[in-house]
Amino acid sequence: MKYFQPLVILLLCLITSTNVVNAQKSQQKKDTTKVKKIEFSPIPYISYDRTMGGVFGALPMIMYKTNANDTISPKSISGMAAVYTTNESWGGFAFNKLYFKEDKYRLILVGGKGNFNSQLFSEEINSYLDYNSDTFYFKFELQRLIIKHFYGGINYQFLDRSTIVDYEGATTQIDRLNILGLIFSYDTRDSVYYPTTGFLSELKIDSAPEFFGNDENFNKFTFNYNKYISLKNNRDLIAARIYTGVGLGDLSFNQQFVVSGTDIRGYTQGRYRGKQIVALQGEYRYNPWKKMGLVGFTGLATVFNGDNTSDNGVILPSIGAGFRYAAFPKNKMNVGLEAAVGKGDWGVYFRIGEVF
């Protein structure tokens, strides 16, 4: 039983990644040619943060139509990645983001395994402590169109994580969680990969109930609103995002909200964490070339009800810039590299698609 869930999960990811598209043909005058069913892009992965150091790896991805006759659904994307860091962390994962039935259904499958050496800030000793986390993770999310622009759905997450802090007397913390959730979204964007107009609003409710075999019981509520404004030249745009998260119940260290990554860049040491978070950011996307572009961004964030009371409510600014490259030009799917500076912290990030 211990290995049953991982085996089922691995099988689901394999089936989804390999059963990609139906055959499609088109005729032009006297010649009959096959339409390209799958677009493939092998991407090297490189980034840097002050916790794990240099991060290196590979990220092959494919884009495709789940149904060749479906002209409404966006192209789906699947890929996998393997990374290794200079502080001897490693990880691998596979992901699928699928659109089908004329975009009436949206499905996400993600699974991965990793062993990460990281750190946390202890107010008690006024210093950082190293910790190791061995993790297996799987996520399933399905949304269905209810009325125009409005989707609703469910998600399931399985997390098996062992964490030990490098501190005298520390014990191993084991999180084995089955998380159930609801998601509601309102999406008026003109593109899911590179929107230039419209907005996306999402509400997520995740719960780890006792009846599902969880030792820790909690509820998490997150809300984000992304807005996209195209400029007069129809090439550049301004994007803005607000993100809030609230945790209730026995929120463990690993389930806390952390100022980092998607919702505020420039913080890679993992110091600022708590049961509540608020983050605001704006981004200017400049596109002077066909396959390459530049971004500049800034933002603010803060956390509340954290382990370090001196960090509660502290305003955390961020500013940075980067470049984008069109890995899949026809679908405006970009990858990129960017650098950001925060309050006493900084980081370099590799991006798959836009941050938001």
Image (tube, grey):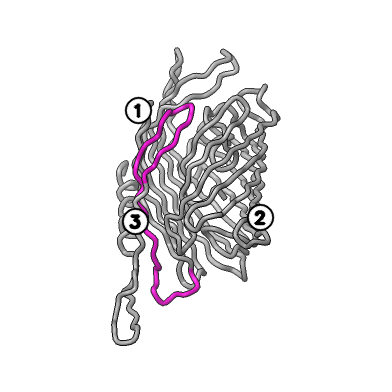
The mark found on residue 88 in the picture is 1
Please indicate, yes or no, whether residue 250 appears anywhere in the rendered image.
no
Judging from the image, what secondary structure is the residue with disc 3 in?
helix
Q: Is residue 107 left or right of residue 39?
A: right
How crowded pointer 3 is (Cα within 10 Å; few <14, some 14-19, many 20+) is rated as some
The image shows residue 187 at horizontal and vertical percentages of 61, 62
Q: Is 209 left, or right, of 200 in this rendering? A: left
Residue toward you, 120 or 266: 266
Residue ranking furthest to the bottom:
30
Dot 3 or dot 2, earlier in sequence: 3
From this viewpoint, is residue 167 visible? Answer: yes
Q: Position of residue 171 (x, y in %)?
A: 43, 20
Neighbor class of circle 1 (other Cα within 10 Å; few <14, some 14-19, many 20+) is: few
At x 39%, y 72%, the residue is: 67
Q: CA distance from mark 3 to mark 1?
A: 29 Å
Q: Position of residue 31 (x, y in %)?
A: 29, 83
Residue 12's tag is 3
For numbered disc 2, what is the local secondary structure?
strand
Q: Which residues are magenta?
A: 44-73
In the displayed structure, 192 sits above or below 6; it is: below
Is 166 above or below relative to 45? Answer: above
Disc 2 marks which residue?
227
Asked if the stretch drawn in magenta spans residue 274, the answer is no
